[in-house]
Image (cartoon, rainbow, N blue to C red):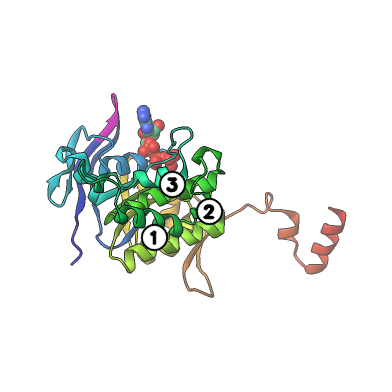
Amino acid sequence: MTSHRLRGERLCVGYESRRVLDEVDFQVAEGRLTILLGPNGSGKSTLLKTLARTLGPQRGQVLLDGKDLHRTPTRDVARKLGILPQSPTAPEGLTVRELVGMGRFPHQRLWRQWSREDERAVNDAMSIARVTEFASRPVDSLSGGQRQRCWIAMVLAQETDLLLLDEPTTFLDLKVQVDLLELLAHLAHDQGRTLLVVLHDLNLAAAYADELVMMRDGRIMHGGSPEAVFTAARLKQVFDLDAHVIRDPHTQRLVCVPAISSSSASPLASAQTPQMATALSRTG
Ligand SMILES: Nc1ncnc2c1ncn2[C@@H]1O[C@H](COP(=O)(O)OP(=O)(O)OP(=O)(O)O)[C@@H](O)[C@H]1O
């Protein structure tokens, strides 16, 4: 049986008078890669922040190893749970090595300064996230994608069993997105870590998730394996997206192909014959 170290019970969460989550129950499957999907504004970040202790619930509770997370000291939480928020910003002038080193704070004590263990964790994290070459550069001098990788390195340096990542693939090119998802799957499958990740790319989510969770209007609509959950009917219901779900002939994985009306498709793509395509490309 899958056990649940992190779970939210009857969570009611909002901002001032506006309620976003209403009585949400959610359990993060241990040792699995769970991907949270949903349209903009559906409450994914709100749920993630509540599970990560950065947002307090108005009602309900989050339990980490059976204890109320919002009553657990920060350092204790940070030793078990790492979070990558959406669009984080680093203090001006902070170098990459300094930023990644901040991931080690929960492991330090007043009487125990920077250790070899900290140094090793920072070097490993920078190497995995491929930012070692930028180590002495200020974070704010890097490109969006390079910066995103530094933040991922900081979370990895924390060496927690639980990782909550909000849109970690923002700014990354497709190759780096795939590399990152490979890494996240490796952390779950080979190291037994528990990951909850918000993503917008439906196909990457279907390809890598052990569990897919779909949200809409602050509610969890569906949860389960991609095979069970990733269907055209559910994509329509949750995202209002007209799409076909087909199997990639090479990998047998499920892939969603958005339906594009023939009037908006490029004439080249909708050309009926190779001769028509050649003629169109000449005139175009
Ligand atoms: N700080 C805030 N103050 C007021 N309302 C907020 C705040 N943050 C989010 N909201 C509102 O809460 C709702 C859910 O937002 P949330 O960021 O959780 O959605 P999301 O699913 O993560 O969206 P996205 O995919 O666009 O990141 C939205 O309607 C949003 O406008």
Query: Marks 3 and 2, Cα distance to the nearest angstrom?
Result: 10 Å
Could you say which quadrant of the image residue 276 lies in? bottom right
Tell me which label, 3 or 2, sits earlier in the chain: 3
**Which range of residues does the magenta coloring cover?**
13-18
Q: Is residue 143 left or right of residue 79?
A: right
Residue 216 visible: no
Look at the numbered disc 2 and give the secondary structure of its residue: helix
Majority secondary structure of magenta residues: strand
Q: Which residue is mark 1?
A: 184
Residue 133 badge: 2
- Above or below for 82 versus 19: below
Classify mark 1: residues with Cα within 10 Å, few (<14), some (14-19) or many (20+).
Answer: many
- Real-space Cα separation, disc 1 to disc 3, in angstroms: 22 Å
Q: Give residue 224's position: percent from left, percent from top.
A: 31, 61
Residue lying at the far left of the rendered structure: 66
Q: Identify the secondary structure beneath mark 3.
A: helix
Give the labeled residue for mark 3: 97
Query: What is the crowding at mark 3: few (fewer than 14 residues within 10 Å), some, or many (at least 20)?
Result: many
Q: Nearer the viewer, mark 1 or mark 3?
A: 3
Question: At which x and y percent is residue 148?
Answer: 48, 46
